[in-house]
Amino acid sequence: MDTLLKQTLDAAINSRFPGMDYEARKLMQEIMVRKEYKKGAIILPEGVISQNLLIVGQGMVRQFYYKNKKDVTEHFSYEGCIVICIESTLKQEPTRLIVEALEDCVLYEVPYNKLMALTEMSWELNMFYRKILEFSLIVSQVKADAWRFETAHERYQRLLHTHPEVVKRAPLAHIASYLLMTPETLSRVRSGVL
């Protein structure tokens, strides 16, 4: 058995629905497909319909989009995180988000159609899926509130506190775009000038 698969699955499940029993975890494990990507690889290009949730086993990815010819980072995900292009996956429409490997990565694809079939068979997998969606909504709301109500310094401090891995591992230009600031502003925030 793939040890990384088990570790990755346990990390993802324990972050959303830790009470899930062994049988439900085994069902989930059976539909997961291991994929490896090199740093810089585009995992999901713009304009494609997302067919999978991704769980990061190793490495870091980002979701981003283009606005006014500049790329804007929407999310960072690393070991144990679940990646979903929610609108594309749920509506089965082409995505505007792009998923890129920021490091060499091992990802596990969870085919959406197979997960949906499992949610009809297993109450626990249904709850896990529900928890994924609830978490995504909360993350989106927290991020929107931070953009609306927090200063650049407060947004950086929140990221540093909640996701220190991102600050350690992601390129500063991507962190700046995620925080809706220029790289120069991020430099001033990091040096304590702002």
Image: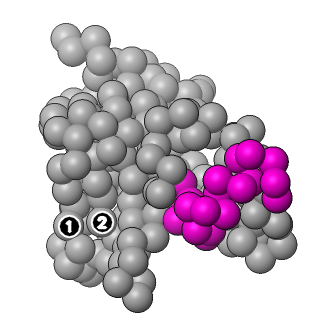
The label shown at residue 45 is 1
* Residue type, numbered disc 2: Ile
Give the position of the N terminus as an image quadrant: top left
Instruction: From the top left corner, tell me how far across and down residue 137 is, in percent.
Output: 61, 64
Q: Residues within 10 Å of mark 1 (few under 14, many from 20)?
A: some
Give left or right: position of 154 versus 83: right
Instruction: Point out which mark residue 128 bears.
Output: none
State the separation of the CA atoms marked 1 and 2.
5 Å
Q: Relative to residue 49, is residue 161 depicted above or below?
A: above
**Residue at point 28%, 54% (across, down):** 100
Residue 98: give its label. 2
SS state under label 2: strand
Q: Which residues are magenta?
A: 175-194
**For residue 98: magenta?**
no
Question: From what the image shows, is residue 19 above or below residue 160?
Answer: above
Question: Callout 2: 10 Å neighbours few (<14), some, many (20+)?
Answer: many
* Predominant secondary structure, magenta span: helix
Figure quadrant of residue 44: bottom left
User: Where, by quadrant of the figure, is residue 70 drawn?
Assistant: bottom left
On whether residue 176 falls in the magenta region, the answer is yes
Q: Please indicate whether residue 10 sits to the left or right of residue 95 in the image.
A: right
- Which quarter of the figure is the C terminus placed in? bottom right
| Residue 95 position within the rendered picture, expressed as x and y whole percent measured from the top left | 29, 75
- Residue 123 in view here: no
Of callouts 1 and 2, the N-terminal one: 1
Query: Does residue 185 appear in this view?
Result: yes
As displayed, is residue 70 above or below residue 186? below
The residue at the point 77 percent across, 76 percent down is: 148
Image quadrant assignment for residue 108: top left
Question: Mark 1 belongs to which amino acid?
Answer: Pro
Q: Are marks 1 and 2 in contact (CB under 8 Å)?
A: yes
